[in-house]
Amino acid sequence: MSRYPSLLSTGSLGALHLPNRVLMAAMTRGRARRDGTVTELATLHFTQRASAGLLCTEAVATSPEAVAGIGTPGMWSEAQAESWRVVVQAVHAAGGRIALQLMHAGRLARSGTTVSSSPVAVTHESRTPTDAVSEPRALELNEIPGIVAQFASAARRAREVGFDAIEIHACNGCLLDQFLRDGVNARHDRYGGSPENRARLLLQVAEAVAKEMHADRTGVRLSPLHAANDMHDADPLLTFGTALRHLASLELAWTHLASMPDGDFTRRLRDLHGSPFVLNGGFTAESADAAIRDELACAVSFGQAFIANPDLVERFEAGAPLAVADPTSWYGTDGRGYTDYPALSRDADARGVGPHLP
């Protein structure tokens, strides 16, 4: 009998049939070229991890103004799309499934003049200590359809090159999160004020992406309790409960909640949403298995564990210990810390401590 019968069981996310419920979370790794194309390193990185139930790319920018930092990949040009096609084909040849995560950085972008829901600067941001922090410009009403169109255009390119799904990045303080949470959004028009208004841009983007990729191949990632990049909300249960009720009407393939240590809060959101989530945030194999068994999660995503363990699923299956990721090589320009973590040897002694996150 499997050590983790729920986590390692087959499942589905919308139209996607998964061999297991161990998902690889999107993680910024900074290895793209200056033009936003990805290299052969990305192809190797993802194919090494193709046994995951579903792979998710790092956050991919929808326009030059959406880029979060050096090494951020894009999906606004044909050259970028063709570079991703190589990755997708290699993952499929290895038996895997891969989703593209689409993002606009908003006030976290590296462009000269950043945009956001409101002219509220970041007082503390966690990307790099050298990035300049400037006050963003509030998007004008007539500019917002263009933001939605950029997401839709990137989604079309993703579908054309063969991605299995798209995950919309609406978390961790990027643009859609900047509209959603009242710690940044101080607007007084139809995109500000009430939770319904603050969720409007997210819903418009989700509808546009689902139209290109189809709802049963579209997911969204939220971070209701995550304070990264100076984010907060006066009433996260009301804000995210409202957003989740509206998202549920779109019948998307999944909703992914990042950094969710509060089980009771997650249960309350689950009840408002009406179905289990993909969950992320400090899970062990044991706690992930329990969350799925208890119908709190339909799958669990892992980040750091997948960095150091390309064969994470096989290690869970074998009850083998996990390698620990070196944070000094999370970002870079070469394969160190990206493609050089070894898989568990077939004849390795898999006895000892059970799987755990570093």
Image: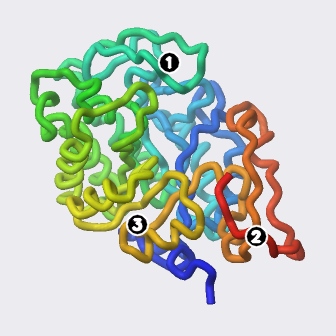
Q: On the rendered structure, is 180 left or right of 174?
A: left
The numbered mark, 3 or 2, whose residue comes first in the sequence reads 3
Residue 330 in sight from this viewpoint? yes
Circle 2 crowding by C-alpha within 10 Å: few under 14, some 14–19, many from 20:
many
Residue at the outermost bottom position: 1
Query: Considering the numbered disc 3 on the image, is that residue within a helix, a strand or a loop?
Result: strand
Between the residue at mark 3 and the residue at mark 1, the CA separation in whole angstroms equals: 35 Å
* Vertical relation: 166 (above or below) 91: above
The amino acid type of the residue labelled 3 equals Ala
Q: Which mark is residue 110?
A: 1
The numbered mark, 3 or 1, whose residue comes first in the sequence reads 1
The amino acid type of the residue labelled 2 equals Ala
Q: Which mark is residue 320?
A: 2
Q: Which mark is residue 297?
A: 3
Query: Considering the numbered disc 2 on the image, is that residue within a helix, a strand or a loop?
Result: loop
Circle 1 crowding by C-alpha within 10 Å: few under 14, some 14–19, many from 20:
some
- Quadrant for the N terminus, please: bottom right
> Nearest the camera: 262 or 194?
262
| Residues marked 3 and 1 touching at CB (< 8 Å) | no
Query: Considering the numbered disc 1 on the image, is that residue within a helix, a strand or a loop?
Result: loop
Image coordinates of residue 8 in percent, x first then y, are 57, 76
> Nearest the camera: 12 or 86?
12
The numbered mark, 1 or 2, whose residue comes first in the sequence reads 1
